[in-house]
Amino acid sequence: MSMILAILCGAFGIIFWGVIFSLLYKGLDRKLVARMQDRYGPPVIQPFRDIEKLMLKQTIIPKNAIPWIFNGAAIFALASALALFVFIPFFYLGSLSGADCSVNPQLCTFSIFPGDLILVWYLMLMPSLAMVIGGFASGSPYATIGAQREMVLMASYEMPLAIASVAIAYVLKTFSLDAIFLTPVWGVSGVFGLIGFAILFLVMIFVIAPELSKVPYDAPEAETELAGGVLAEYSGRNLGFFYIADAVKAFALCSLIIAMFFPYGINFLVESPSLGLILDMLFFFLKVFLLMLFSLFFVRAAFARLRIEQASRLFLVHVLSISLLGLFLVVLDTIIHIDPMPILASLGVIL
Amino acid sequence: MQALKRAIWVFHLNTGGCNGCDIEILAALTPRYDLERFGIKLVGSPRHADVLLITGPVTRKMEERLKRVYAQTPDPKMVVVVGNCGSSKGVFHHHYNVVGPVDKFVPVDVYVPGCPPRPEAIIYGVAKAWIKLEKLKEEKK
Ligand code: SF4
């Protein structure tokens, strides 16, 4: 019983801190992009003020909307985004919902439902899906066009994402996040595998922006042409829910990609385990920041919006073929395994 | 209310002006003036807005739209009129297609005079809208 209580408290704690850090990253995003454009920019805590204000505002439900779907979509988006925090291993081993006993029996204190990569990808998809449903339910032509575009975009970027996940699962023979976290793919693959995973990692970085419908793939929410697109009819509290869900998704997606490709910590630098954990945490936040900097901030500051069919073609043709090449190399690696160590040693890299 | 002061989202509506004021509003967003440092953000839908920034006199066709946009904005909301012609019809005074200044149709909180006003004046006007909101709060007490 106390176990369950502890887990519940833990879940609330991690969701609380997760939301705070997600919003801070969003504030950093706005500040840094403003600095890149030679503006002063809003303070880093601006998203908190936005949220506070949105919660104070009146929540209008349009006459043409279907109220329960319209409101439900907002809650659904927030809930599924928050549920991500329970399953993703951040800088510690084992997600909050329990360690995967089949992977590391010595750490297996409890296990309710460990969750895996597939579940997390579906949860990641839910907020966008909720936006589409809410957009259609709001009965506004702008929101409907936005929802259609969002669906097209979703259909385009999901394929490369799935390929990258399948490649990892193919090598490690499991979808368990704990296993992926414990055995970074770089350690177990040969030369072809290394190249393949490097390609897939780049593909993942590329897919972050459309997954979050950020510039240059923000055609579903285009403010200048679609009046806010899918969110055009949302106001007050509902808009606030989507705002938080968006920030949370950005943070969770970056954490997941880090857990998949770069789960290394720096706790070997110090003796005591608690200090190590703190160091790991700081290092983790640095990693998330760097990933966001290159995949979101720079891109947002530098590019204009792509038309939806341009974005779709980019992902369905170019990114998809590149990720298929990555998958091919990874599979090739399991057939012809070339140990990378001698090659690295001959290049003078000391490991 | 404190939060609203620091996170004003602005929806911009042209009810028939010459576009001069609209260009000045955009100038207020450029790096030189940078509205965003006060947390002011231009949004695309009146549903997201706290402040309606209205430019131009109200033409016959826009009258209905103006009222609708006002009704679509969630409370608490403020209306800022930018430019002479929105405040008093200005250079469009005797036009056959102009039905009146903005305050004939919706309650206006702040007028920013000028044809067009400078970006500083527009920022100042939006800032004045906060004060209006404080007054409302005190009246309620
Ligand atoms: S006030 Fe002057 S500049 Fe502004 S819209 Fe009217 S006529 Fe144009």
Image (cartoon, coloured by chain):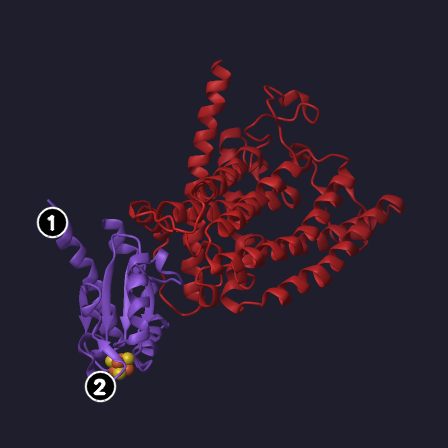
Return the disc, 1 or 2, that comes first in the chain's sequence.
Answer: 2
Q: Residues within 10 Å of mark 1 (few under 14, many from 20)?
A: few
Q: Residues within 10 Å of mark 2 (few under 14, many from 20)?
A: few
Return the residue nearer the eye: A296 or A226: A226
Q: Residue at x 44, y 44 (%)?
A: A21
**Colour in which the image shows chain B:** purple
Q: Is residue A284 above or below residue A233?
A: above
Return the residue nearer the eye: A323 or A139: A139
Disc 1 sits on a residue from what chain? B
Q: Is residue B28 left or right of residue A146?
A: left
* Mark 2 CB within 8 Å of ligand 1: yes
Q: Is residue A65 left or right of residue B28?
A: right
Q: Say what amino acid the circle numbered 2 marks.
A: Val
Q: Which of pointers 1 and 2 indicates the residue nearer the eye? A: 2
Ligand 1 is found in the corner quadrant, namely bottom left
Disc 2 sits on a residue from what chain? B
Residue A105 x, y percent position in the rendering: 68, 21
What is the CA distance from the residue labelled 1 to the residue labelled 2? 37 Å
Can residue B21 be seen in this snapshot? yes
Q: Say what amino acid the circle numbered 1 marks.
A: Glu
Q: Residue at x 33, y 49 (%)?
A: A54
Can residue A265 be seen in this snapshot? no
Instruction: Look at mark 2 in the image and give the residue it sits on.
Output: B91
Instruction: Look at mark 1 in the image and give the residue it sits on.
Output: B138
Residue B124 x, y percent position in the rendering: 21, 68
| Name of the residue lying farthest toward the right | A336
Residue B28 x, y percent position in the rendering: 32, 72
